[in-house]
Amino acid sequence: MNLKRLRFIDKTFIIVLGMILILGLVALTSASQGISGAPYFYVKKQLFSLLLGVVAALLIIRYDYSHFRRYSMILYGLSLLMLITVLVFGEEVRGTTGWISLGPLPAVQPAEFTKILLVLSFADFLTRRKGELTTLKQMLPCFLYMGVPFLFIMMQPDLGTALVYIAITLVMMYIAGANPRILTYIIVLAVILVAVALFMHFKFGMWLPLEDYQIKRLTIFLDPYDDGQGGRGLGWNTIQSLIAIGSGGLTGKGLFNGTQVQLNFLPEHHTDFIYAVIGEELGFIGAALLIILYGILLIRAVYISYDAKDIYGTFIVLGVSAMWLFHIFENIGMSIGMMPITGIPLPFLSYGGSSLLTNMVAVGLILSVNIRGKKIVF
């Protein structure tokens, strides 16, 4: 790689990303204080994952992203192999068989890594079909291509990651020139079918490919007190998250002073509900600042996609952006009681080595596209 290209790296993207990572480490430090005997356990592991992620990002930045096109089928096959492996050898965590144990090393979540592999392979798949996605017949191969890993994910079952796959597929297809009217019809039809299926399940007991408690988790946000235990069952997480964020007020209770967090009323506050930690301890100002930072990061990513030297680079950046946007929308939405609880982590904030490493690899890909942009001339 020509080092002169580093002069053109998007500094705003880097600075904003750094601010999000710092805010995430601060929030995780506070969230870890209530852990008896090991208040910095999660922070240390997150820092180690971040270090690995930075190294991975730097290596990818040095590599010309366009070379990934040569291995698109290998990457696609690898993603399917990983999903099959986790179905066969995976460990069940909270009702989902999505983790692979590595002995003394931390367990990994292959579904996180497959998101990047599928973005890279699907980007090549769409590049070969750009301008040829005007009819449903022409679009079917795309749905089949992403439908196979989607089905494997649903077999775990991991609805959260499956929804991320859908977001990536639709956004990348739209950018590739897929007929927006057909995409809209498909989305509307899917929403209607899901609503009807849920109605038939609750009214007539129709079978769905999810356990009853998983289905209840997806609908309990509509009325978290209607969980059969007065809000002390499946609705507890949503209720405590709302209490935490609401009690933060404008400026928050201060770091390490959030009662819902420090007294462990709020479950999973270092993973799924890290946003509630920020809302309680840093208040509306801190919570809004985080959303603004995410917004700037995504906007800079879109600018980078426009300046890519080829359409393949554009697809990669916008595929990653779609992944991040859905994660942000869903995670924050479930924290404020507006979206179902799916266990999707908040990018760069939620504790999780697989998630953080995946996101840092995504950063490396975006910056690899960035420094090789079409406007850079020597």
Image: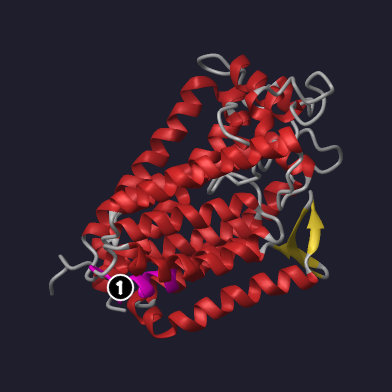
Q: Residue 260 sits in which quadrant?
A: top right
Q: Is residue 327 positioned above or below 360 on the image?
A: above
Q: Residue at x 82, y 68 (%)?
A: 104
Question: Percent x, y for residue 138?
Answer: 33, 69
Main SS category, magenta section: helix
Colour option used:
secondary structure
Residue 240 seen: yes
Question: Percent x, y for residue 35?
Answer: 81, 38
Residue 18 seen: no
Compare residues 279 and 206 and report the one nearer the observer: 206
Q: Residues within 10 Å of mark 1 (few under 14, many from 20)?
A: some
Q: Is residue 346 left or right of residue 124?
A: right
Question: Percent x, y for residue 329?
Answer: 49, 39
Compare residues 186 and 55 and report the one nearer the observer: 186
User: Farthest front residue?
Assistant: 204
The residue identified by callout 1 is 127
**In the rendered structure, which segment of residues is drawn in magenta?**
120-131
Q: Residue at x 74, y 68 (%)?
A: 87
Question: Percent x, y for residue 170?
Answer: 40, 55
Q: Is residue 115 left or right of residue 242?
A: left
